[in-house]
Amino acid sequence: MEEQWQNKYVVFFDGDCGVCNFWVQWILERDKKDQFLFASLQSDFGQKFLSERGLDTKVFNTMYLWKPNQYYLQKSKAVLQIANLLGGIYKLSWLGKIVPAFLSDKLYDVISRNRMKLANQKCYLPTPHQRAKFIQV
């Protein structure tokens, strides 16, 4: 199955988090090159991704960006790479790389810890084209 995704990036997110779902929607709306797929960390696919890499399968406070058969990034590195891949004005995200990862990940962790307070779960209805980008939710 991974062979068909060679030119895609998979974003793993907390399917129960309003902030995470907001960002998935944000990426979907800007993915003009049709390069992202999505899966919740709670899904069977997400659980397999986590367990194959020795990552905690019960904690969902981290966003991952996976390029099949190449690499995966987490936290602020994943966010910056997603922005870079979207292109356009978002390519300016490379400026974020001048901040050491331990500092940007600390900011990511603060937001992550408070994410349930920041946004309520909202019902988002993707278009049929967008729905096709979800591996599992």
Image (cartoon, rainbow, N blue to C red):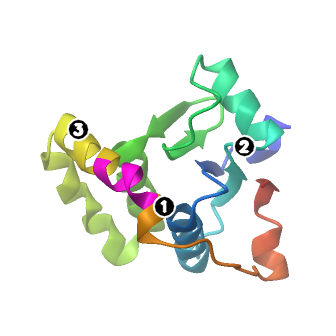
Q: How many C-alpha atoms fall within 10 Å of the one at disc 3: few (<14), some, or many (≥20)?
A: some
Q: Name the residue beneath numbered marker 3.
A: 101
| Of marks 1 and 2, the one in the foreground | 1
Residue 42: give its label: 2
**Residue 113 in picture, x, y percent from top left:** 38, 49
**Residue 33 in picture, x, y percent from top left:** 60, 70
Residue 14: give its label: none
Q: Secondary structure at mark 2?
A: loop
**Quadrant of residue 70 in the image?**
top right
Q: Name the residue beneath numbered marker 1.
A: 116
Q: Is residue 50 above or below residue 93?
A: above
Which of marks 2 and 1 precedes in the sequence? 2
Q: Is residue 1 above or below residue 89?
A: above
| Of marks 3 and 2, the one in the foreground | 2
Q: Secondary structure at mark 1?
A: helix
**In magenta stretch: residue 5:** no
Which of marks 2 and 3 precedes in the sequence? 2
* Residue type for callout 2: Gln
Which of marks 3 and 1 precedes in the sequence? 3
Which is more toward the observer, 116 or 31? 116
* Residue type for callout 1: Met
Q: Residue at x 78, y 83 (%)?
A: 127
**Residue 99 in picture, x, y percent from top left:** 14, 46
